[in-house]
Image: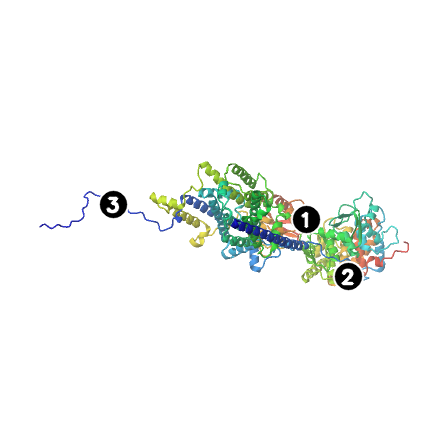
Amino acid sequence: MTLAIASEPQRDTAPQEPTALPALEPKLGTRLALGWNHVLATGFFAAFFVYLSYVPLFHTDIWGHVHYGHWILENRTLPQEDPFMPLTSGMRVVDNAWLSQVTFAGLDRLAGREALSVLFAVTVLATFLVYFRVFLRLTRTVGLALGACGLLFFMSFSRHAIIRPEIFGGLFFAALWWMLLSVEPWRNRTEREIRDDADLNERSWPAWLWIATPLMFVLWANMHGSFAVGLVVLGCHVAGHALTVLWRERKLFNLFQDRTFRRWVWLTELALVATLINPYGLDLLIETARFGKNPNLRDVLEWFPMKLVDLEGIQFSVSLIVMMFALRFSRLRFHAVDALLLLVFAVAVAPTIRMISWYAPVFTLVMTPHLADMYRRMRGLRRGQEPTPAQLAQRRMEDGAMPFAPTLICLLIVWTAFSFSPLSRPVLGGKPRSAEQLYSHHTPLQMTEFLQERTPTGLVFAPQWWGDWVSLHGPPELKLFMTTNLHLAPRQVWRDYLRVARGQTGWPRVLEKYHVTTLIVHKELQPDLARGVRRATDWEVIYEDDEALVLERKDTL
Amino acid sequence: MLKKTNAHTWTRSAAIVFVAVQLMLATAAIVVAAQRLRALDARTQLPPVRNEPLTVTPLYDDPRVITDAQLQDVLHALRPRLRHEQPKINHVDHALRFWGVEAEFADPECLSGREMRQLLIDHRLFQEMWGEDQQPLLIAGETGVAVRTQEGLATASHVDHTLATLAEIGTTLDHPVVTDQGIRSLHAVLEGSLRKFSLNQLEYEWSALAYASYLPPTKSWYTSEKQRVTFDDIADRIMRQRLNQGVCMGNHRLHALVVLLRIDDQSRILSDEGRSRIVEHLADATRRYVASQYEDGYWLRSWPAAEQAHDLVPEGDDTLTNRVLATGHVLEWWALAPSELHPPREVVVRAGQWLARTVTEMDEQTLKDNYTYLTHVGRALALWRGHFPHEVYSAPDSL
C-alpha cells in the first residue's frame, strides 16, 4: 500500500504578477483636501498679506489717533477738548474712534511701530478674507470669488493703503455682509428659483444673528464713525424689502404682516440701540450724522466731490459700465434691496469721494452674483458644476496622485508669506525695518529730530498733514496751530490756517495774529508759502532738508 | 380651513402689535432725539445779559498829573465841535465816549452827549446829518442790528467800537435804537455782535469791553462757531500777540484787560489763574513803559522794547501824533488800573504835564486831525483827577 503524501498546494510554475496593495484611506477628512484653485487663492492672499505688511505707515492722521490713544491711557478718561491744539479750546470733542485709538496706542506701547504695521496688514487681510468667503458663497467658485476680490481691490484702491480707524470699520462692514448673507437667500438666485422655493421667506433667522449683530455694532460704534454706514445698509434692507412686499401686495397692512419685513425692522432697531452703548450715548449718533456738514471739511481732498477724471471717478465710471452690462445680460433677479443700496451709496460718493470705500464693497457684493451668472453663460457652465474639494481629492486618489498635495502647497505658501513678513521676526529673528522703510517717505523724520533738539517756544504752524506726527514725536510742550483734527477748529482759525498754508496774501498778518513763532513748510506741497517765507524779512530759516523748511520769527517782542 | 384662519388671525395680530410697538418706539425716539438736539442747540443760544451795564469809575485824584486850570484848558480845546454837516462817525463815537451822555455845552458848535448818542443810534438824525443817499449806519437783520464799520467816514472805525462806547457811558440794553427798518433796542446790537463774534476775529478789544459790561454774571457762552468762550479766553486772546500790535500801539488791548480786572472786582468773571495772568501781563507792560519814557514825558511805538526803545524808533515814526497817541492811551488805562500796576507817580506826572502843554499849544487843524487820539488824552487827564470829563468841565465865560 502506497501512502499518499500530502502535497503542498499546487503552484503555477510560471512567474506571477504581484498582487496590488489596496489603496490606503486617508485619516484626514477630505474637507482638508484643498484643490488647485485653493492654491491659487492662497497664493493671492499670501502675496497680498506680504504686500500689506510692507506698506509704509502713512504720515498723517494715524499719529493723531495714536497720540489720542496715549493721552486716553495716561489720563484714563476721554478728552473733552483736543489736548494738542490750543486754538480749539472750547470746542467739544466727541471721539467716535476712541477704542481704535486705545488699540493703536496700546499696541504701540507693547510692541512698537512694527506692531501697528502688522495690525494693519492683518486687519485688511482679514477684511478681504471675509469678503472672499462672502463671494465664494455667492458664486460657489473659487476663481470667481477671487475675481470679485480683485474687482473690490480695484474699486477701493485709492484708500486701501492708509492705516487709520477706518480699517476696523472696513472689517466690520465685511463681517456685516457675511452675517446678512445668511438671511439673503435671494441674493444669488434666479426668479424661477425664488418662486419655486416656497419656504424662502419663512425660514427662521439664526439665533446667532440676533446676538452677533448688536454686539458687533457696539464695538463698531466705539471704534469708528462708519457704523452709520452699517446702519444705512440695514435700513436699505428694510426699505428694499418693504418696496418688494408693497409691490407684490399693494396693501400697506400686508407689509406689516410680512414676517421678513418685521425681522429686518427689529434687526435694524437692535443695531441702532446697540450703537448707543458708547461714552457719549445719543450724542455720538447726532455728531456722526452732523460730521459731514462741517464746513472745514470742504477744503480737504478726501471730502471733495467726485470728478470723473480722478481715480475715484474712473473707478466709479467702470462700476457704472459693469452695472449696465449686468443689468442687460444677467438672468438673476435684481432685488429692490440691491437697487436701493446701489442708489444710496452711489449718491453718497458723488459729493464726497471718500465714500468710495463703502460704495466699492456694496457694488462688488451686489454685482458679483450677476457677473458670475454672465461668466457661466459665456462658458456654458451651470451653477454648482465646480467639483467640491472632497470630489477633487477622490479623483486625485483614483489617478494615483496625492490627495493632499494642494493642501501641503497651501501650507507652504502660508509659511513662506509668514516668514517674509515682519510678523515672523519675533519668531524667526531678523533686523527690524529702518525708519525710512517703516514710515512713508513724506514723514519728516529728520525735521522732527531737529525740533527735539531745539524746542520751539510759542505756537508752531505746520501743515496739518504733518501736525499729528510733529505733535506726537516733537517735544512734549510743543503747541500746534493745526493737526488733521481740523474739524475741531473754529471756522475763523481754519480759514486763517488755509491762508497761511497756501501762501495767500496776508499770511504774515495771520501769523502775527496768532503769535506764531515757528513756521514749518512742506517745500514740495506748499511752494507759494515756501517762496513767500524766504522773502520775508522777519523770519529766519533755522532748518532745511529735502522736504521741510523750518523758520523762526526774528523779533519776538 | 380652521388652521389657515388661525394662522391668518395670528399674523394679523402680530402685525397690529408690530405697528403699535413701532409707533411707540418711533415716538419715543423722536421725543428723545428732539430733546437732546434742543439741549445741544441751547448751548449756542445767546447768553443771558444784564440790562444795565457794569461800568468802571476813576480811582485816583492827583493834581500833580494835571492841575484844575490845565484840565479846563485841555477839555475846552477838546470840546466836540461836531455840529456841522457830515460829522465823522469816528469822531462822534470817540467824543461820546470821552464826554459821556450827560455832557452839555454852551458852545452852539458842540453836540451834546445826548445828541451824539442820538446820532449813533437814531437813523433819522443820522440821515438828517449825512443825507438820504448815505447808507445807513445801522443795519437791521434777523440776527440783530449791526453797525456799519470801516466803510468810510460815515461808519464806525473799529469792530464793536460803538457798542463798547454805549456800554462805557452806561446805556441800558432796552434803550431804543431806530434803524431804517424800524425801532429795535440796544439789545439787538449786542445780539448782532454776539452772533458774529469769533475769538480770532481781527478786532475784538471793543467786543471784550462790551461783553464785560453787559454779560456778567454770565462768565461763559458759546460763539457762532460753537466754541465755548470765557472771559479768561478773551483775556488770553488779548495777551497773545506782541505788545505793540493792535490798534493804537496795543493800548486798547491793555485798556480792555484793565476793564476786565475792574469788572471782575464787581462780578467775578475771571478765574484766579486768569486774573493772575492779566496782572502779570499788565505789570510787564508798565515796566516797559517806565523804561522807555522820553525825558519830556511822552512815548512812541517802540515802548515795548523798554530800555532799547529809543534806539529802535523807525524812521519817520517820531511824530507828534504818535507821541500823543501813545501817551494819552497809556495814561488812560493807568488811570483805571489797580495801583499795583502803576509806574512810579513821577512817570505819570511827567506824562500828564507833557500832554497838558502839548494839547494847549496845538492849533485848530492839529486838534481836528488828531481828535480821536486826543479824546483819550482828555479822558485820561480827567480820570486822573477822579472824575469823568463832563463832571468837571465848565465852559469859559466867553461862551
The chain letter under disc 1 is A
- Whichever of labels 1 and 3 marks the residue nearer the N terminus, that label is 3
Q: Nearer the viewer, residue A84 or B376?
A: A84
Q: Position of residue A495 (x, y in %)?
A: 65, 47
Which residue is denoted by mark 3 in the rendering? Answer: A18
- Does the CB distance between marks 1 and 3 fall below 8 Å? no
Total numbered circles: 3
Which residue is denoted by mark 1 in the rendering? Answer: A509
Check the image and name the residue furthest to the front: B1
Task: Count neighbours of disc 3 (C-alpha within 10 A) and say few if under 14, some if 14 to 19, many if 20 or more.
Answer: few
Tag on residue B352? none
Name the residue: 87% across, 50% down.
B109
SS label for mark 1: helix
The chain letter under disc 3 is A
For the residues marked 2 and 1, what is the alpha-carbon distance in whole angstroms?
A: 37 Å
Task: Count neighbours of disc 1 (C-alpha within 10 A) and say few if under 14, some if 14 to 19, many if 20 or more.
Answer: few
Name the residue: 43% across, 54% down.
A427
Task: Name the kind of residue labelled 2 in the image.
Answer: Glu
The chain letter under disc 2 is B
Marks 2, 1: nearer the viewer: 1
Task: Name the kind of residue labelled 1 in the image.
Answer: Arg
Q: Nearer the viewer, residue A394 or B214?
A: A394
SS label for mark 2: helix
Q: Are marks 1 and 3 on the same chain?
A: yes
Q: Position of residue A25 (x, y in %)?
A: 33, 49
For the residues marked 1 and 3, what is the alpha-carbon distance in whole angstroms?
A: 100 Å
- Does the CB distance between marks 3 and 2 fall below 8 Å? no
Task: Name the kind of residue labelled 3 in the image.
Answer: Pro
Q: Is residue A200 visible?
A: yes
Tag on residue B346? 2
With respect to residue A315, does A456 lie above or below? below
Q: Position of residue A359 (x, y in %)?
A: 55, 44
